[in-house]
Amino acid sequence: MHYNFAQASMRIASRAKTIAFFITLGACLVGFAIALNVSWIILNWREVVPLVLGIVFFVAIIAGVVLNTTFLVREIRKNEQQDSFLNAVTHELKTPITSIRMYLETLQRRRLDDAQRGDFYRIMLEDTDRLLGTVEQVLKAGEARHGARKNWQPVDFAAVVREAVELAQLRHNLQPGALQLGHPLAGELTMMGNPEELRTAVANLLDNAVKYSGDQKDIVVDVLTPDIDTVLLRVRDRGVGIPRPELKRIFKRFYRAQNAPQIKGTGLGLFIVRSIARRHGGDVFAESEGVGRGSTFTIRLPRIYRA
């Protein structure tokens, strides 16, 4: 772990130096271009055509330098996000595999009573679920990026949300009241969509709320119909909150909240939610009053959507 941390620190320092180099190079090139342009103007201030051409070329050079520097810095930051994603996925894969191997070796070498053996089997199954969950997240992110085949059919969205809430309560071993429906979902709420993708979007949103709620979980889920053509799923928590500049960035691929680096994840969950919502003709957005003041995520979906 300390070795990985040291490696990560070295990579961050290296990238910071690279970014500083390109910014410095860009500033030097801009300064050189300004000096050249001023010299050209001084030498040709009486001749209109050379003067105009010099100014045009100067503007083109400055624009090219700025665009080039912006592109390079953006690519470096994108590589940082991808490295962070690879580190997170490696951890999410390695940890359960190591745990399963340890318990299997213990079962192989020692004689255990039925109660201990049952505990070992339960823990290994939980690790297997975690492993499968990580793999599914990566696969679904790939589908979300390239687009998936649409399989529209009538879906009871209320039933999807109820099942997702019950599953999240069991998966995270939540206390009663930690995750609950704000209003009872009576009857059906039928809409057109891909049932598997809608389940994935709702589950990811609930998992995100649980993950970033800390020890005192207080999550409320509401399904609203502001008009006959629209369905809203709103998930509110009282967790770590989101800084205002990050409210839009958190839906980007590989992006992870900067104010909670200790929370593990792949940075794909919210990206998948947004991709599914947009593929269904809707969208998702986040609201927060700031760090430590919780957050609210809302998915807006049309009842009927035809591309």
Image: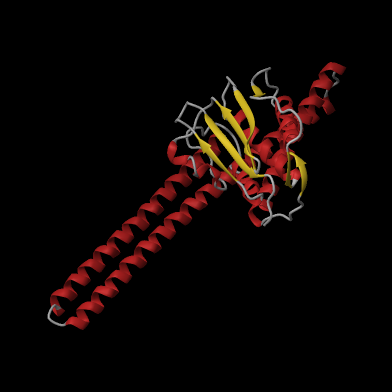
Residue 137 at x, y = what percent? 68, 43
Q: Is residue 113 in view?
A: no
Residue 3 at x, y = what percent? 54, 38
Q: What is the quadrant of residue 66 in the picture?
A: bottom left
Looking at the rendered image, the quarter that the N terminus falls into is: top right
Is residue 227 toward the left or the right of residue 163 in the image? Answer: left
Residue 176 against residue 74 in the figure, above or below = above
Residue 54 at x, y = what percent? 24, 76
**Quick one: 273 or 194, which is closer to the camera?**
194
Residue beneath the point at 68% across and 17% down: 176
Is residue 298 toward the left or the right of residue 94 in the image? Answer: left
Residue beneath the point at 50% across and 39% down: 6
Colouring mode (rainbow / by chain / secondary structure / one colour): secondary structure
Looking at the rendered image, the quarter that the C terminus falls into is: bottom right
Residue beneath the point at 61% across and 26% down: 220
Residue 113 against residue 240 in the figure, above or below = above
Residue 13 against residue 119 in the figure, above or below = below
Residue 40 against residue 150 in the figure, above or below = below
Residue most extreme to the front: 228
Count of all numbered marks drawn on residues in the image: 0
**Quick one: 278 or 105, which is closer to the camera?**
278
**Quick one: 303 or 52, which is closer to the camera?**
303
Residue 89 at x, y = what percent? 63, 42
Q: Is residue 147 in view?
A: yes
